[in-house]
Image (tube, rainbow, N blue to C red):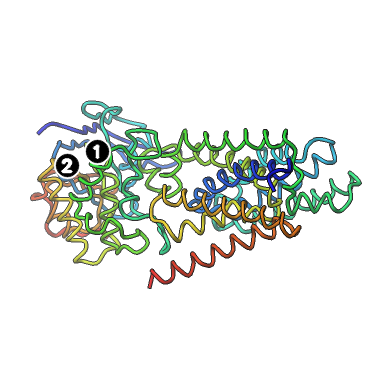
Amino acid sequence: MTELVNAQHLGLAFSNRQVLKDLSFTIERGSMTSLIGPNGVGKTTLVRLLIGNLQPTEGQLRFTPDKQTLNIGYVPQFRNLEAEYPLSIRSFVSLNQFESRLPWKSRKERQALDQILEQTHLTSLQKTTMGNASGGEKQKAYLAQALISKPDLLILDESTASLDIETKEEVMALVAELNREHGLTVIFVTHDLELARKYTDQYLLLKRDQYEAGPMSQLDPNLELD
Amino acid sequence: MLTFDFMRHAFAASTFIAITCGLIGVFVVARNMSFLAHTLSEIGFAGASFGVFMGIAPLNGMLIFTLLSSITIGQMSAKESRREASISAISSLFIGLGILFLSLSNRNASYATNILFGSIIGISLADVYQLVILSGAIMIGLLVFYRYLVFDSYDPIGAQAQGLKTNLLSIYFLILLAISVSIAAQIVGSLLVFILVTIPAFIAKYLAKSVPGMLAISVAAALLGVWLGLWLGYLTNWPVTFFIATIEFGFYFIALLYHRRISR
């Protein structure tokens, strides 16, 4: 496997508070990594460093081939779509298509859209409005929207947090399938250790002033987060 | 009817304004900015009155006021928790200013009525050119950043997550909105810009599931409203604004019934 992200002695301090300190880890291409840790430990801050919203104040964060070329897809934790939200799942997913500036989609873009909807098992639901979609269908649409830009790395921020157990499994099985069949590299930010163990192969555990990283098989089986 | 210059001017200007408002309205509704658009139109009223007071064209006064205030207003009402309060306070201030400028300019009440409720009949050819140029500028403005504006309007959190410069897009959109509100007020008056800037877009929201579909329906609803309104106004000599408002309300009511029926 080749390295996609390499963090060396990474740190971030705001004016009065050190949020991350001396953090070193790698993310291999094609891996599925769980980013876990108690609330307030800096998981979201680390995600913001990865997507370029924040810059580290210490250490280095290197991307392969480089930050400009590496395409990172990010599925944020919260979306507030009202019940009367009008766009269909298909239209919603297509919002993130920028191959051209024209208002209408090219044939190539329509084909790419069909393909993503198929991969995320949304083809038969594509005309359903997002306002009428279930929690799981919405999550799949968020996922599809991030995937339509063909990211090298996909970051899922607590994407399953608000779902029931069955839907959580369904969404994670889909992510695992995309990882297996299309080599998608995934960072899964979660509190759900059971899902993390079942679907991801690496972990990065943030604790107060320390961290652990390694294969999922080495994660303490008695670990409790909160 | 079209043998009269004033009717030809009214139709030409209304057509461009309706297309522009139909297009921008879809974004206004998606961004939950209906009341902000209304506030801008009240600021426009103060601007038009200021224009009358200073001896410049009311439309130019409106453009100056709405453009200068659009960004500040956008920032003041950005937080949903204080949006209502900010909008009420700003509206009151500018309506007060509008009344002051009209009073200072010693114009009669019919001038105020024209600004507040519209006066498309009697528009000059030079005015038509100006409105067409402004409408064209807004349409080009929308076209240039179309995909970015659509993403940011329909999924601001997703757009931010994908790295779009959403703050800059908001400012850009507010500038386009300020111009749109100023030109819409030329037909339906500054008190009733809702009629063209938001009602057609709400109609479209109930009938379409894609952005191009909503844009098409919104433009069609706005165009039908102004065309029929002008025609009925010509036939009856009643205010055009009344007819446009009634027609748009009728369309809205039908769209709402249809939406409720298919949502069951």
Q: Amino acid at mark 1?
A: Pro
The N terminus of chain A appears in which quarter of the rendering? top left
Determine the chain carrying the residue at label 1: A
Q: Position of residue A19 (x, y in %)?
A: 35, 43
Q: Position of residue B78 (x, y in %)?
A: 55, 49
Q: Amino acid at mark 2?
A: Leu
The residue pinned by badge 2 equals A184
Residue contact between numbered discs 1 and 2, judged by CB atoms under 8 Å:
yes
Disc sitting over residue A23 in the figure: none
Relative placement, left or right, of B20 versus B147 is right
Q: Is A111 in front, or is B103?
A: A111
The residue pinned by badge 1 equals A151
The C terminus of chain A appears in which quarter of the rendering? bottom left
Q: Residue furthest bottom?
A: B264
Find numbered disc 2 in the image and state the secondary structure of the residue it sits on: loop
Q: Residue at x 39, y 33 (%)?
A: A101
Relative placement, left or right, of B92 versus A41 is right
